[in-house]
Image (cartoon, rainbow, N blue to C red):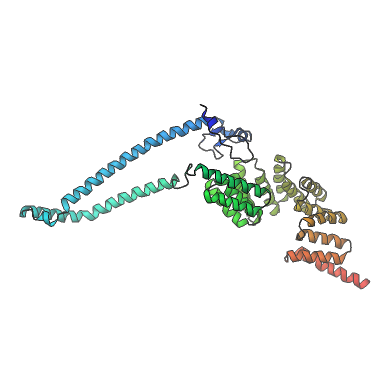
Amino acid sequence: MNQTKDLSIKCQIEHHHNNLQLACFNESCIANRVYCHECLRNGDHVAHMKDQLDLKDLINFFEQISEENDGFLKKINKQIEKINQKAYQLSQGLRKKYSLSFAKLQQLDAKQLNQAFNKIIEYRKILKTMVGEIEECINHLIIQLNQQIKGLQLEELQYCELTHQKITEVEEYFRKGQILKNEYKYEEAISYFDKALSLNPKHLLSLHEKSESLGFMENYHDAIYWANKALSIDSNHVDSLQTKADSLKFCGNYQEAIKLAEKALSINSNHVNSLQTIASSLKSLGKYDDAIKWAQKSVQLDPRNYKSLQIIAGCLRTLGKYNEAVLYADKALKINPKHLASLYTKGESLRMQGHFQQAITTLDDALKINPLDSQCLASKGACLEAQFRYSDAIDHYNRALQQDSNYMWALQMKVECEKKLRRQSAIL
């Protein structure tokens, strides 16, 4: 019978549709040890091809380890039995020799009583030392055993601890959560991931999906907490590394975000979202040329990655390359016409070129998506001001400041616009 055919397990990479087919026996490998041919085509394990074997070899390996483990356990049990025998011999000997009841004492003559008394005096001298030595020996053994238990993680969830029914329930809750997450119903999605985790607290994908959902809800601190839980199970889980990195980025910890994203890329050099996270972090650090390079790497792997296209557009706008910024913003909007950041970048770039009416049209499209976006409101205000529509401009600046009272550019623009309005009123 073909064992690999019976062992039908889908590859854990979400967008891979094949079953596991290969196993990596390289001791230094940090990638997934069991994988499909698509993983191999993506460059995983190419550095140590000689250590790659078929899944049937993995099954044989597990059987071999089981046999070795059984042999080891027999040896341990024999040693435990020897200890038990010696402990029993010691306890029985001490009880027989030194536990003398009144009835036994009555059976002794004067010479025997004198000998027993001398032995008891000697015994009392060595008893404390003997007890201390035995306790020290036992404590040392317990420490050694605890270290082995901890090192081998024997107290963690066992591989086959969940019943088949619970496994099915976990996967069903997870699947429903994914559907809701893809529909942007993040709170409902999290409720299903929580149900999966109540049955299996170490269900890696539910932990990651919950973390990512919290990130999409801008609850970044909780997102980091749940990403850490996922990483405590698999410290090399690429998606969780990237999700944590992205949350750190939004918390302003750009250097930490870059380090985590780089770790993810050391495991999977083609991980698009990690490339995007590095690009976005570099943009926030003001390293625009470097940000563009990393975002371009992301776009090369995924030409439809509109977020990376927008990062390029945003950097170009900041560098004063407005024509190029509009081109890249249009590329992003062709993929996602409702991408707010791309609409803002395009609108602001058009404004800086003096194309005020085109800019207003683009910014209006953005404000239809989010009427409270402070940047789009302020940018439209600047366009209206340039068209001498000072009252309308001040209204937009005020609306922007209602959303963000610390928006200094909007405040400065409003003050200058009010001066212009007063001068205009005075002339009229």
Query: Percent x, y for residue 131?
Result: 25, 53
To which quarter of the image does residue 224 belong? bottom right
Examine the rendered structure and indicate whether residue 99 appears above or below residue 24: below
In this view, which residue lies farthest toward the right? 428
| Residue 51 can be seen, yes or no | no
Q: Residue at x 71, y 41 (%)?
A: 302
Query: Percent x, y for residue 342?
Result: 77, 51
Compared across the picture, whether 409 is left or right of 48 comes to right
Instruction: Pick the residue in front: 354 or 223.
Output: 223
Q: How many marks?
A: 0
Q: Residue at x 61, y 40 (%)?
A: 13
Query: Percent x, y for residue 238?
Result: 60, 44
Q: Quadrant of the C terminus?
A: bottom right
| Residue 383 can be seen, yes or no | yes
In this view, which residue lies farthest toward the bottom? 426
In this view, which residue lies farthest toward the front? 165
Q: Residue at x 75, y 49 (%)?
A: 310
In this view, which residue lies farthest toward the left? 110
Instruction: Pick the residue in front: 85 or 376.
Output: 85
Examine the rendered structure and indicate whether residue 63 appears above or below residue 408: above
Query: Percent x, y for residue 394?
Result: 83, 66
Q: Residue at x 87, y 61 (%)?
A: 386
Compared across the picture, whether 154 is left or right of 219 comes to left
